[in-house]
């Protein structure tokens, strides 16, 4: 077996063992040992293996997981129909669909704004300006990484990773080694930065939104800031290791002068206003963040209407050898169309998340998550369980993994809840498919940032993961 696939294979092989152990101890989860459960688990495992080798077979990652989700729920439906429990299965699948719908709408708005900024030449203009500076690869690596770590607690890890990824791809288009390393660095930085803020990652948002009462205090807004130092360590360790492997040289000099198009600065402000609206809906109104994001999409729609009505065709860009001036804007030849920006979202990424969430929801309905909870939190103990949850999030994606933990609702101390928040957030960095930021960036940087280009740096990221856990256990020992 390919050594790169061995950890994933071992993880999936343990689940039937859990089912067998449960059957032997009489826990009563019959569907986990029924052929329906075993076949469903096999379908999901095979689908994820196909995702892992996407760059070799050139098959979009959404296809196998959507098929697996259909097989899993089809088998569940058949079983439920013959056991007169169809209404329970219907409620379960609707819950998974609702969970996905909130994430999809959130991501769709972010991607639409990123596409709008790209169409307004914001990233090309920035590339033009930075290209004049002729920064070294190492300097760009640290600038984009640190900026990602600083911005992700406020703008959320997904949108920050997409923005920084777009900047990297526009700065350097030929050196695939640098692009792959810089994108890996951005994914690690975005997940680490998002781990210590309720708004930085959907996993932390989910924990805060649940209003969990631990054995020594409530997991409130300010509790998450205890994770700042461990998160910083998680980012700095792999970044420092990668620093010494970066290619020598500088960015190629860019002679052409590219201006941002009319309305670009206002779209940036609308994007920030959209994030603020989402935070307000979640924090003050206790409504899903996706409602605020969709409200923010309407801002862009109305502004797009204004741009379209006041459109005056002009040159697509101006070329000169002078230093770029960001205060100058030009008009494009085609009027702005917000629905084209929506259509050009990374739908493969959105559908991949759909397949993963539905599949994991189905496996949970079959009883595998309950079995895992009994093994992890009762037999292994909270610390070992929470570290294992972080490792599992690299395969199952951190959002469904955190959803699994919140469904289990284990009784833990504040320090342990913070530990699982940290591990689920930064554990998703171990593989490119472990977090929404990695999945989305793979879609935007096709052929340059891939599953295996990220996997080359998994040992360094794992070292940062271990260092961040040790840092938390040391600094926050009084909370454990």
Image: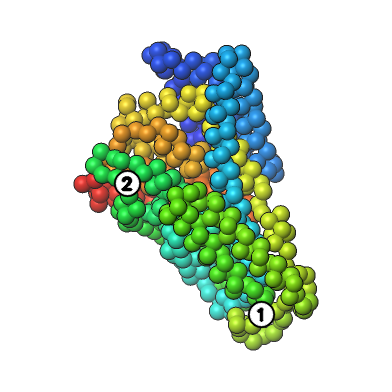
> Within the image, what quadrant is residue 377 found in?
top left
Residue shown at 48% from the left, 54% from the top? 281
Comparing 352 with 409, the one in front is: 409
Residue shown at 31% from the left, 51% from the top? 223
> Quadrant of the image for the C terminus?
top left
> Quadrant of the image for the N terminus?
top right
Residue 438 screen position, x and y as percent: 54, 50
Residue shown at 56% from the left, 55% from the top? 293
Residue 252 screen position, x and y as percent: 62, 73
Residues under numbered marks 1 and 2 in contact, where contact means CB atoms less than 8 Å apart: no
The residue where tag 2 is placed is: 219
User: Which mark is first along the chain, 2 or 1?
Assistant: 2
Q: Secondary structure at mark 1?
A: strand
Residue 283 screen position, x and y as percent: 42, 54
Residue at the limit of the structure toward the bottom, as seen here: 322
Residue shown at 51% from the left, 26% from the top? 365
Comparing 152 with 264, the one in front is: 264
Say if 8 sits above or below 122 in the image: above
Say if 220 sits above or below 244 in the image: above
Residue 351 has which mark?
none
Q: Nearer the viewer, mark 1 or mark 2?
A: 2
Residue 334 screen position, x and y as percent: 78, 70
The residue where tag 1 is placed is: 329
Q: Secondary structure at mark 2?
A: loop
Report whether residue 168 is seen.
no
Comparing 109 with 364, the one in front is: 109
């Amino acid at each position: 077996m390919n050594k790169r696939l061995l950890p994933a294979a071992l993880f999936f092989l343990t689940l039937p063992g859990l089912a067998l152990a449960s059957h032997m101890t009489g826990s009563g989860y019959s569907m986990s040992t029924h052929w329906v459960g075993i076949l469903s688990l096999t379908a999901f495992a095979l689908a994820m293996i196909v995702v892992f080798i996407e760059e070799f077979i050139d098959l979009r990652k959404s296809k196998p997981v959507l098929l697996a989700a259909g097989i899993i729920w089809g088998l569940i439906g058949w079983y439920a129909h013959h056991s007169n429990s169809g209404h329970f299965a219907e409620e379960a699948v609707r819950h998974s669909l609702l969970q996905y719908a909130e994430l999809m709408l959130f991501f769709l708005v972010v991607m639409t704004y990123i596409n709008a900024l790209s169409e307004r030449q914001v990233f090309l203009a920035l590339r033009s300006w930075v290209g004049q500076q002729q920064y070294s690869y190492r300097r760009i690596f640290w600038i984009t990484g640190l900026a990602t770590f600083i911005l992700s607690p406020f703008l959320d890890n997904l949108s920050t990773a997409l923005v920084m990824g777009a900047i990297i791809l526009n700065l350097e288009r030929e050196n695939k080694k640098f692009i792959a390393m810089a994108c890996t660095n951005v994914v690690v930085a975005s997940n680490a930065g998002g781990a210590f803020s309720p708004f930085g990652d959907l996993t932390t948002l989910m924990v805060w939104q649940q209003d969990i009462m631990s054995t020594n205090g409530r997991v409130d807004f300010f509790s998450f800031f205890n994770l700042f130092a461990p998160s910083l360590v998680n980012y700095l360790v792999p970044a420092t290791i990668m620093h010494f492997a970066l290619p020598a040289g500088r960015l190629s000099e860019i002679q052409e002068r590219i201006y941002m198009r009319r309305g670009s600065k206002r779209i940036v402000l609308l994007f920030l206003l959209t994030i603020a609206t989402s935070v307000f809906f979640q924090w003050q109104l206790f409504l899903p963040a996706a409602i605020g994001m969709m409200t923010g999409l309407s801002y862009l729609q109305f502004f797009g209407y204004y741009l379209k009505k006041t459109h005056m065709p002009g040159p697509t860009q101006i070329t000169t050898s002078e230093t770029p001036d960001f205060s100058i804007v030009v008009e494009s030849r085609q009027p702005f169309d917000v629905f084209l920006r929506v259509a050009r979202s990374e739908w493969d990424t959105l559908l991949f998340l759909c397949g993963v969430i539905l599949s994991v929801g189905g496996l949970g309905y079959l009883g595998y998550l309950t079995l895992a909870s009994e093994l992890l939190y009762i037999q292994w103990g909270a610390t070992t369980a929470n570290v294992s949850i972080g490792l599992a999030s690299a395969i199952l994606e951190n959002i469904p993994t955190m959803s699994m933990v919140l469904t289990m609702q284990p009784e833990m101390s504040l320090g342990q809840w913070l530990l699982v928040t940290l591990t689920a957030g930064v554990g998703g960095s171990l593989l490119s498919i472990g977090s929404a930021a990695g999945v989305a960036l793979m879609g935007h940087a096709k052929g340059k940032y891939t599953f295996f280009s990220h996997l080359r740096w998994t040992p360094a990221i794992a070292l940062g993961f271990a260092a961040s856990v040790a840092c938390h256990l040391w600094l926050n020992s009084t909370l454990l």
